[in-house]
């Protein structure tokens, strides 16, 4: 089990070194959450999955990732406020490593579930170190070289090399799954005294020459006499007066210098009676090599009554929690520099105390060679006042000189602060998730809004601004509808009509992305698109023409529910000026006004099935280009008189696949049919659409906003005529009479006998609703 602090550090490393996107990929591959609570415990598998995903994504060995994590973990701890604490562990690498367990022991007071690794260090005669690493987790030993190297470089201005020399288990160590021995070779720190200027060096050499020719001073002579004098025998307090006079002569008002070689003095006998000693150190134990208890502190005797019995073995009443070694003198002496945590055995406690939690002691083992006994000087390991109360103990049970008193009180406050911090972290995470969810919902709302209105106009409306109508000098408008749509509605169920239209519009909508044209509206089976509005572009006619070709290709894959064959559509195009603006307040829509709209509608209504009908203005723009255009001739157009029109056949400059904007994963164009099957089987967000390139395309970052020209109020007569298929001109009826008769034959005699009263009502409802919507809006 690991605290979230470790996983947060790993996330910080990936984000800082490789970026936020890399972290998102790693966490998705590992299947873990994005944020970790600092004081919450997580399974070890989460960290291992992240490391494994990092190795796979970066293509490096696990030991490389772990070592880099170890180096970064040290820096992360420093930034988190543990810098000063780490610096005080020791003045060199040996002392630092020797006190790591003590640091972990202190941190475990606040982080109760912490399961930190353990360290033991040995000096070799050649100056190298043997660093023993013990852990319950396998495969993480390579973190150690990263951490130790960073410590030595930062704290001791030196460099080290570490290599694994052994991975064998020791018999004395129990419970740990991994024991690795590192050989540590440390390069000496740079001698700063040698990096001085020449003047300082000359002065020091001159001073040394002067001192060499001068006679020995009185202080120097006194130091020699002290060194040659022997120490008094017996009690260390009955020393000769000359000794203290010498000391006073060396230390004069803070200006003298103490002797470099310190040798303590000891009394002949210990001037503390056993009763006082057992009260002053109420939780100490003295035991011999056979683990027989020789003496114990008074409070420990009260908590563990069995200690009052003579000749009992210590392992009968206690077990070693840390370090996890066998309970023998040899094992204890091997880990003598570690702090030891002993725990009372529940089965050896009095029956009345069975409900009490076990007591843990934390302290130091001291070997007394003269007595061949081990002194365990300990204190109760209590993390809070609650644990003190649960064991029916009081602060007064702990000796006044023991800092455990202060530690319990301070840690109780620390735990309260951690709980408050944890709550704040949880609230922060909840707010982050709510904010993320709100942002996702906002994007959905904006996507829906931008589908109804142009983006720049929608943004102005969101800001509370009014959007006035604007004039566009040049644009191309397209209308399309489904041939015999009324007959299809009369025969089929409404849900079949919905599926057919949805399949058709889904393909048409994707084409608007490929050719960057604006979808104005759909009413029933009618589809309206404009190029050059709301963003003016010079290639508006080419875009709409290619879009029309794409419509005819895409419609082949939409099935007519009556005949079971592909549907047929009519398409009409016209170019000219329009007025554009937002109409309505409760449900605003972006509408187009002007005779160009009327003429484009006439081109569609006077067209032929599966033909793209062009007006003369569109022909003038597209002629002499890569588009193949066939002259239809002069026809009578309702409200326009005689007009020479044209049919658009194809575009020889690009392929059908490019017009559809589809390409396979290998970058090669694939058939229209297979792409269409992919469209039917996949979500539209999963389809890769390749926009067709035009000469006036700009990078998305440089795409200009729509240019709104001086507003003009449209005349009442500028509205476009109904898009309903019932309002067909006589000329169009004559042109399509033969086709309609053939279509009726394909129905197979469904006739009036098949048209039930319910189907007639459905068809009439569809037509009436479509007509009503058309009359309400000018262009919706």
Image (cartoon, rainbow, N blue to C red):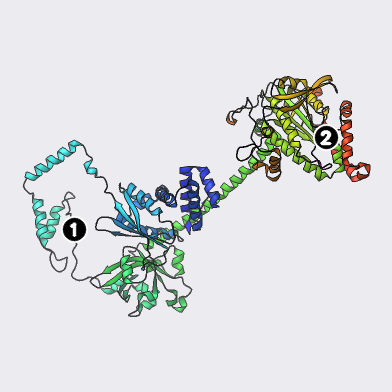
Please name whichever residue, 558 or 86, is drawn nearer the observer in this view of the structure. Answer: 558
Inspect this view and state whether residue 711 appears: no
Indicate left or right for 240 with 292 as reference: left
Q: Quadrant of the C terminus?
A: top right
Q: Residue at x 54, y 46 (%)?
A: 24
Span shown in magenta: 557-563
Helix, strand or loop at label 1? It is: loop
Q: Residue at x 18, y 36 (%)?
A: 199
1 or 2: mark nearer the eye: 2
Q: Label 1 belongs to which residue?
A: 262
323 on left or right of 770:
left
Task: Say whether residue 272 is left or right of residue 695.
Answer: left
Report x, y in % for residue 345: 42, 74
Q: Residue at x 84, y 45 (%)?
A: 493
Secondary element under disc 2, as helix, strand or loop, is loop
Between discs 1 and 2, the one toward the N terminus: 1
* Residue 601 appears in the picture as rendered: yes
621 is within the stretch colored magenta: no
How many numbered discs? Answer: 2
**Residue 560 among those drawn in magenta:** yes
Q: Identify the residue position indicated by label 2 in the image.
A: 483
Instruction: Kindly give the residue lying farthest to the right in the view shown.
Output: 753
In the picture, the disc for residue 359 is none
């Amino acid at each position: 089990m690991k605290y979230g602090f470790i996983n947060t550090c790993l996330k910080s490393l990936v984000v800082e070194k490789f970026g936020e996107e890399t972290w998102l990929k790693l966490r998705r591959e590992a299947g873990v959450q994005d944020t970790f609570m600092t004081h919450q415990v997580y399974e070890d598998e989460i960290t291992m999955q992240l490391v494994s995903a990092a190795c796979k994504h970066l293509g490096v060995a696990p030991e490389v990732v772990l070592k880099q994590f170890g180096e970064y973990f040290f820096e992360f701890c420093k930034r988190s406020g543990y810098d000063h604490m780490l610096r005080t562990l020791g003045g060199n690498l040996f002392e630092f490593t020797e006190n790591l367990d003590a640091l972990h022991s202190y941190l475990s007071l606040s982080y109760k579930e912490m399961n930190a690794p353990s360290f033991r260090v040995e000096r070799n005669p050649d100056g190298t170190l043997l660093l023993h690493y013990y852990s319950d987790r396998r495969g993480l030993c390579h973190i150690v070289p990263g951490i130790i190297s960073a410590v030595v470089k930062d704290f001791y201005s030196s460099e080290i090399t570490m290599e694994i020399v052994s991975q064998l288990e020791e018999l004395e160590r129990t419970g740990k799954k991994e024991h690795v021995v590192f050989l540590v070779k440390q390069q000496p720190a740079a001698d700063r005294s040698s990096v001085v200027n020449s003047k300082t060096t000359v002065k020091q050499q001159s001073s040394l020459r002067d001192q060499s020719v001068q006679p020995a001073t009185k202080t120097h002579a006194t130091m020699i006499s002290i060194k040659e004098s022997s120490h008094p025998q017996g009690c260390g307090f009955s020393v000769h007066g000359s000794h203290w006079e010498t000391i006073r002569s060396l230390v004069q008002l803070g200006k003298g210098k103490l002797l470099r070689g310190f040798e303590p003095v000891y009394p002949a006998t210990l001037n503390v009676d056993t009763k006082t000693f057992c009260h002053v150190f109420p939780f100490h134990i003295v035991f011999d090599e056979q683990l027989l208890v020789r003496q114990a502190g008074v409070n420990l005797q009260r908590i563990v009554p069995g200690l009052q019995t003579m000749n009992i073995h210590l392992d009968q009443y206690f077990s070693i929690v840390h370090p996890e070694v066998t309970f023998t003198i040899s094992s204890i002496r091997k880990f003598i520099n570690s702090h030891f945590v002993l725990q009372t055995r529940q089965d050896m406690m009095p029956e009345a105390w069975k409900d009490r939690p076990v007591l843990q002691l934390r302290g130091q083992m001291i070997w007394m060679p003269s007595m061949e006994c081990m002194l365990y000087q300990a204190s109760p390991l209590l993390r809070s006042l609650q644990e003190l109360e649960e064991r029916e103990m009081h602060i007064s049970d702990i000796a006044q000189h023991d800092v455990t008193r202060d530690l319990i009180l301070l840690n109780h406050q620390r735990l309260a602060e951690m709980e408050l911090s944890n709550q704040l972290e949880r609230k922060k995470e909840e707010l982050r998730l709510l904010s993320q969810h709100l942002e996702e919902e906002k994007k959905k709302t904006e996507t829906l809004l931008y589908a109804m209105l142009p983006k720049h106009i929608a943004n102005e409306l969101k800001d509370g601004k009014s959007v006035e109508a604007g004039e566009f000098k040049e644009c191309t408008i397209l209308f399309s509808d489904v041939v015999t749509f009324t007959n299809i509605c009369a025969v089929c169920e409404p849900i079949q009509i919905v599926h057919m239209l949805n399949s058709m519009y889904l393909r048409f909508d994707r084409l608007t992305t490929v050719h960057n044209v604006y979808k104005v509206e759909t009413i029933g089976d009618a589809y309206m698109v404009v190029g050059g509005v709301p963003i003016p572009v010079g290639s508006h006619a080419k875009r709409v023409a290619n879009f029309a070709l794409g419509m005819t290709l895409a419609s082949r894959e939409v099935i007519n529910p009556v005949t079971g064959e592909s549907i047929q559509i009519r398409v009409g195009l016209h170019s000219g000026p329009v007025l554009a603006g937002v109409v309505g307040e409760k449900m605003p829509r972006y509408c187009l006004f002007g005779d160009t709209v009327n003429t484009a509608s006439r081109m569609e209504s006077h067209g032929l099935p599966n033909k793209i009908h062009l007006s003369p203005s569109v022909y003038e723009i597209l002629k002499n280009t890569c588009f193949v255009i066939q002259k239809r001739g002069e026809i009578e157009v309702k409200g326009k008189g005689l007009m020479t029109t044209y049919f658009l056949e194809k575009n020889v400059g690009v392929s059908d696949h490019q017009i559809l904007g589809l390409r396979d994963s290998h970058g090669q164009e694939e058939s229209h049919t297979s792409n269409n099957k992919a469209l039917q089987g996949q979500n539209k967000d999963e389809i890769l659409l390749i926009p067709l390139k035009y000469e006036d395309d700009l990078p998305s970052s440089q795409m200009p906003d729509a240019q709104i020209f001086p507003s003009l109020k449209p005349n009442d007569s500028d509205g476009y005529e109904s898009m309903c298929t019932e309002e067909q001109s006589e000329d169009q009826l004559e042109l399509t009479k033969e086709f309609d008769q053939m279509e009726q034959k394909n129905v197979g005699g469904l006739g009036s006998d098949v048209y039930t009263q319910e189907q007639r009502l459905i068809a009439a409802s569809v037509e009436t609703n479509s007509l009503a919507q058309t009359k309400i809006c000018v262009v919706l």
